[in-house]
């Protein structure tokens, strides 16, 4: 905390700043110009850069970068082994072995699935070929009988047109209407081709086939998922919740049914003591709506109208559109973001903060519905439920931002440091990727700024963000420190695709539109395991990794 003297000096130096005033809005489209990162440009003065024929011009600022490329704003089961990884006192060797085992098991499962599919297809093809051979043999016999004509034995003739046991007449194939030999040959060839092809099961998208009780909807739980849910319920049913044990359980994902209460506890919004929770909820909710009465009417005042206008512009850009564009949801988000900006004048509202409301809002809506929230009419909820969801979302988002507020103060120094740390970390874990980016003059700030500013929310589907935040809230300094290692693991995850791109434009298009649409819990779990391994592998990393 600063002294009173420092506060006065600050406001004296920054006379233009008043609480709640709009600050420069930086985001993926308009990132800050950092003199430290661009010292060479300042020293160079007005010297024109040497011309290099055939080489793309290097973007020195985000304003120049914006003019040559577009920003991409419009864009299985958990492993038990991950439970142990959240324990802080584990031996590093044990942790590393566990993380490696998770990744190795994932690779083996994919290989086994591929072999099983190949074997099954081979078996079906064999069966189909046997059936075709049998049909051909039977048809040849019948053709021989037809050619013999009157020479057919009386028993065979009787068999072809004898009544069945239920009194119906069973005709032979030879008595059916016969087309031209050419037609018969064509039908036979088509039948042969059709039966030669192996039967393939319908392809089910990853999103549909995942037994994921952690996202929207309530698919049937497996026995293992039911067991994990029981563990959470038993832990939360006690008079005093063991938060350390809750973190260990939550690291590898929280069941949808208990996620709202688990997030409120892990964020520090609710106390561990069960008897105090109702009174705390009532007090904090009343406090939030007291802020609404006190401040919200000032949104059109001269000092605050720019802030409110920017919020009003940014909300329609959020996703999922089917949710945030509902008038009731838009009103709720506007109030949450405006009140937060008024109460945090050091940063005010900055583009990117708006995205951080969505996961909390969606999770707390789950307390009241069972269907998919994206297709749910939020206005159909009772007014009291909507008020509770709004207040809880505000306070939990505030708790999150308390740990990363330097990401959103003037010039966003927290993001600047994290992007620089990411660059150094990637250079150590995968030099090939790092050198490839350097070769084509791709600056980390040009793509990773958004990763830090929006916590990968623009890169991952909402269901994956919610699963990721389970671990972030269970991990010490998850949003401020562990997120760096997740970003490093995420970048290296696309190593093959990155190395295949051979120019600046191709790399930027890839990095701004990574193909994660069909990601689910399995992919996020592998990503988190790799990030955890990196965290311990670079435990001796420079101090700025931990800022």
Image: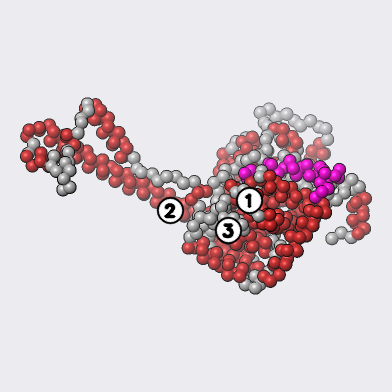
Front: mark 2 or 3:
3
Magenta stretch: helix, strand or loop mostly: helix
| Mark 3 element type | helix
Question: By what rule are the colours in the image chosen?
Answer: secondary structure
Q: Is residue 251 shown in magenta? A: no
Quadrant assignment, res 311: top right
| Mark 2 element type | helix
Give the magenta-colored segment's residue range: 296-322
Residue at the spot 43% in from the left edge and 49% down from the top edge? 114
Residue at the spot 75% in from the left edge and 38% down from the top edge? 61
Residue 256 shows which numbered tag?
A: 3
Quadrant assignment, res 52: top right
Looking at the picture, how far across and down is residue 354, in whole percent?
71, 48
Asked if the residue at tag 3 contacts the one at tag 1, i.e. Cβ–Cβ closer than 8 Å, the answer is no
The answer for how far apart the CA atoms under marks 2 and 3 are is 30 Å
Quarter of the image with the N terminus in it = bottom right
| Marks 2 and 1, the one that precedes in the sequence | 2
| Mark 1 element type | helix
Question: Which of 47/467 is in front?
Answer: 467
Q: Is residue 313 shown in magenta? A: yes
Residue 380 shows which numbered tag?
A: 1
Residue 112 shows which numbered tag?
A: 2
């Amino acid at each position: 905390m600063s002294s009173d003297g420092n506060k006065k000096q600050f406001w004296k130096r920054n006379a233009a700043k008043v609480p709640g005033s709009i600050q420069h809005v930086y985001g993926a489209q308009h990132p800050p110009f950092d003199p430290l990162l661009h010292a060479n440009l300042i020293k160079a003065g007005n010297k024109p850069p040497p011309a290099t024929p055939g080489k793309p011009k290097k973007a020195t600022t985000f304003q120049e970068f914006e003019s040559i490329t577009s920003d991409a704003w419009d864009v299985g089961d958990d492993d038990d082994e991950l439970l142990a990884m959240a324990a802080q006192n584990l031996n590093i060797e044990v942790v590393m072995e566990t993380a490696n085992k998770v990744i190795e098991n994932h690779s083996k499962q994919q290989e086994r699935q591929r072999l099983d599919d190949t074997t099954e297809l081979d078996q079906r093809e064999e069966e189909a070929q046997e059936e075709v051979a049998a049909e051909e043999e039977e048809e040849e016999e019948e053709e021989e009988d037809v050619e013999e004509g009157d020479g057919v034995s009386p028993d065979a003739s009787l068999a072809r047109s004898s009544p069945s046991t239920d009194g119906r007449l069973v005709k032979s194939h030879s008595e059916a209407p016969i087309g031209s030999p050419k037609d018969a040959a064509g039908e036979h060839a088509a039948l042969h081709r059709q039966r030669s092809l192996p039967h393939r099961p319908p392809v089910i998208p990853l999103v549909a086939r995942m037994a994921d009780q952690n996202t929207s909807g309530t698919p049937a739980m497996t026995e293992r998922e039911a067991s994990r849910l029981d563990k959470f319920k038993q832990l939360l049913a006690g008079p005093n919740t063991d938060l350390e044990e809750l973190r260990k359980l939550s690291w590898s994902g929280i069941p949808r049914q208990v996620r709202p209460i688990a997030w409120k506890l892990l964020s520090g919004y609710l106390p561990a003591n069960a008897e105090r929770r109702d009174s705390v909820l009532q007090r904090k909710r009343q406090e939030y709506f007291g802020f609404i009465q006190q401040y919200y009417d000032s949104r059109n005042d001269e000092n605050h109208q720019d802030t409110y206008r920017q919020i009003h512009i940014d909300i329609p850009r959020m996703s999922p559109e089917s949710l945030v564009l509902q008038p009731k949801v838009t009103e709720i988000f506007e109030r949450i973001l405006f009140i937060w900006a008024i109460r945090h004048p050091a940063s005010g509202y900055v583009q990117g903060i708006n995205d951080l409301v969505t996961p909390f809002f969606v999770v707390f809506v789950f307390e009241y519905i069972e269907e998919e929230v994206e297709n749910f009419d939020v206005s159909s909820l009772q007014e009291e439920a909507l008020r509770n969801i709004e207040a809880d979302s505000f306070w939990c988002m505030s708790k999150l931002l308390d740990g990363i507020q330097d990401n959103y103060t003037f010039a966003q120094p927290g993001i600047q440091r994290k992007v620089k740390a990411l660059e150094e970390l990637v250079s150590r874990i995968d030099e090939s990727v790092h050198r490839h980016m350097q070769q084509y003059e791709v600056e980390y700030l040009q793509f990773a700024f958004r990763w830090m500013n929006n916590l990968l929310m623009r890169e991952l589907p909402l269901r994956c963000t919610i699963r990721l935040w389970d671990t972030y809230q269970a991990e010490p300094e998850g949003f401020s420190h562990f997120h760096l290692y997740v970003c490093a693991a995420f970048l290296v995850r696309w190593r093959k695709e990155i190395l295949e791109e051979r120019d600046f434009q191709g790399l930027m298009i890839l990095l701004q539109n990574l193909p994660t649409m069909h990601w689910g819990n399995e992919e996020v779990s592998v990503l988190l395991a790799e990030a955890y391994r990196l965290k311990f592998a670079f435990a001796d990393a420079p101090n700025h990794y931990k800022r």
